């Protein structure tokens, strides 16, 4: 597969430049971070339901929606995918339990 999350992030950035009446991405971003966050939350809930129900096709479709809306939400707060990936890379040296224990409370 040649399409990546970086490609999707670039597409989100490109579509963010369009007028809101021509782009769903631009419309979400025009609504501010709160609008983007709410839409991400809706999509996340839909994915949780699809996972619970277990049908593969809806899981794939909802997971795609979650990834797209995650990137829109990150853009709304000027957070890049590279920053998220660096954080994930930092965590890979720890077990999940050790990483959680090391987090500030």
Image: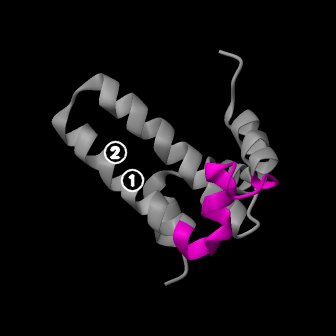
Judging by the rendered image, the residue that carries numbered circle 1 is 44
Residue at 76%, 56% (x, y): give it: 19
Residue at 63%, 60% (x, y): give it: 27
The stretch drawn in magenta includes residue 68: no
Is 62 on the left-hand or right-hand side of 33? Answer: left
Q: Secondary structure at mark 1?
A: helix
Magenta part of the chain? 16-35
Q: Quadrant for the N terminus, please.
A: top right
Estimate how packed mark 1 is, as few (under 14), some (14 to 19) or many (20 or more) residues with alpha carbons within 10 Å.
some
Residue at 76%, 67% (x, y): give it: 78
Asked if residue 80 is positioned above or below residue 105 in the image, the reply reads above
x then y, percent, for residue 29 = 66, 64
x then y, percent, for residue 88 = 64, 51
x then y, percent, for residue 36 = 56, 65
Is 17 on the left-hand or right-hand side of 97? Answer: right
Labels 1 & 2 near each other (Cβ < 8 A): yes
Tell me, for residue 17, which label it has, or none.
Answer: none
Q: Quadrant of residue 30?
A: bottom right
Estimate how packed mark 2 is, as few (under 14), some (14 to 19) or many (20 or more) residues with alpha carbons within 10 Å.
many
Asked if residue 16 is positioned above or below residue 76 in the image, the reply reads above
What is the count of numbered marks? 2
């Amino acid at each position: 597969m040649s399409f990546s999350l970086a490609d999707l992030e670039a597409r989100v950035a490109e579509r963010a430049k369009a007028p809101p009446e021509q782009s769903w991405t631009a419309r979400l971003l025009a609504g501010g971070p709160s609008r983007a966050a709410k839409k991400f939350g809706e999509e996340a809930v839909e994915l949780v339901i699809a996972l619970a129900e277990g049908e593969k096709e809806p899981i794939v479709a909802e997971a795609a929606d979650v990834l797209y809306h995650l990137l829109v939400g990150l853009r709304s707060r000027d957070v890049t995918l590279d920053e998220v990936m660096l954080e994930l890379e930092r965590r890979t040296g720890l077990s999940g339990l050790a990483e959680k224990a090391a987090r500030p409370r």
